[in-house]
Image (tube, rainbow, N blue to C red):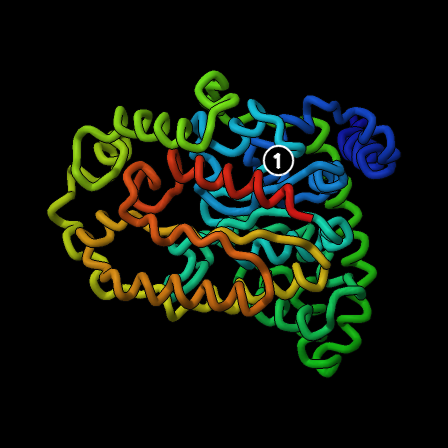
Amino acid sequence: MKKYAFLPLIIAVILFLVFLFIPNKWLVFLVSDKDVEDAKTALNPLMFQGEYMQNRLLQEPNMLPIYGSSELNRFDPFHPYNYFKANDAGFTTYLYGRGGTQSIHHFLNFAAQEKNLKDKKLVFIISPQWFTKTGVDEFHFSPNYSMLQSYDLALNDELDPELKKKAMERLLEFETVKRDFILSTIYENEVTGGEKYPIKAALAKPVAFFNKKLMEKKDLYYSVMGTPREKLHANPEMVEGKSFEQLTKHADEYGSERVTTNDLSINDRYFKKKIEFKLKELKEFRKDESYTDSPEYEDFQMVLEILKDAGAKPMFVSIPVNGKWYDYAGFPQERREEYYAKINKQVQGAGFPLVDFTAYEYEPHFISDTIHISWKGWVYLDHEMANYWKLQ
């Protein structure tokens, strides 16, 4: 019996070596066109935290990706993915972002994809709720954090040194990063100009390189496995070949059928599940909040800088909140206007175009719950995206 004691260990080692040394081209061959198409709307953190599938999508010549957060899974017939599947505007799109995805996550992703962003048009949706007093917290940072992209940053010698240093300083504020001895050693060495841990950092870099190769391989395996797509709620007949006026009319009708239980412009399902049972408690509950003082502005500035450094052509979209709900919640309109003005100034100061939807706080069916663009809001965004693509 003893001679078989190490058999499971030997098998495990053999399987690990097969996993590690199988040629990448064999795995790439197994990623089908359907896998790539499904990835466009899967809203899968494994894709967000990886690189292979995004490399493939960004290299498509007529790709117009949309970056954002939780609003991207508000699928209805007017959602950009559904709309542009039904109406050929000369491009396709894929979605990057989910709840908790904020500027620092987007920065890491853009830094890893910098070579694919040269002259690439993209849409970036800015959410007001990112800009809280604390900014992104550990609870939301960790599930959306990409270790692969962080290691890519550590080993990236082509990125602007000052921007790289600023990003590393910010990332070291998160426990998820600090707990990674190899990564944090390299980061701390770089942010101190090589003064801290010079020997440890020199020894850590080859390990980091090996770790990164392992993560790249794992990313390929995830890409091969594929992921189920979100339920898209598509209705091509409702949107195909329709004018802007017809679409807004259909969106109003669609929204009206789904907002019948309250006068706060919140869809019935969300209102019943999240708000109705504690409506009185939520009166004035945001009266002391503001979106003008937040570490998110510095994180967002890094997004602007990496896109400029990459030579990308982003169109930023400033989303309003639900005015009726925020009035009820006690968040004064004056403070909301201060946030809108500040983000507008920051984007335009970077020289990028901004689609400003913030005048539509009270527009019926522009927002489907308290903060998420939907229905008529998507119609307006579809219109702006089509026009943006036509620009030289």
**Could you tell me which secondary element the residue under label 1 belongs to?**
loop
Do we see residue 2 in this rendering? no
Residue drawn at x 61%, y 58% is 107
Coordinates of residue 288 in the picture (x, y in percent) = 23, 66
In-front residue for pair 232/175: 232
Coordinates of residue 175 in the picture (x, y in percent) = 53, 62
Quadrant assignment, res 373: top left
The mark total stands at 1
Do we see residue 26 in this rendering? yes
* Residue highlighted by disc 1: 93
Coordinates of residue 191 in the picture (x, y in percent) = 67, 76
Residue drawn at x 53%, y 53% is 316
Coordinates of residue 28 in the picture (x, y in percent) = 81, 31
Q: Residue furthest left?
A: 280
- Callout 1: 10 Å neighbours few (<14), some, many (20+)? many
In-front residue for pair 196/366: 366
For the N terminus, the image quarter is top right
Residue drawn at x 21%, y 32% is 272
> Disc 1 residue type?
Thr
Q: Eyeballing the image, is 98 above or below 238? A: below
Residue drawn at x 42%, y 57% is 130
In the rendered view, does 42 fall on the left or right side of 13?
Answer: left
In-front residue for pair 216/319: 319
Quadrant assignment, res 284: bottom left
Q: Eyeballing the image, is 287 above or below 23? A: below
Q: Eyeballing the image, is 190 above or below 236? A: below
Quadrant assignment, res 208: bottom right
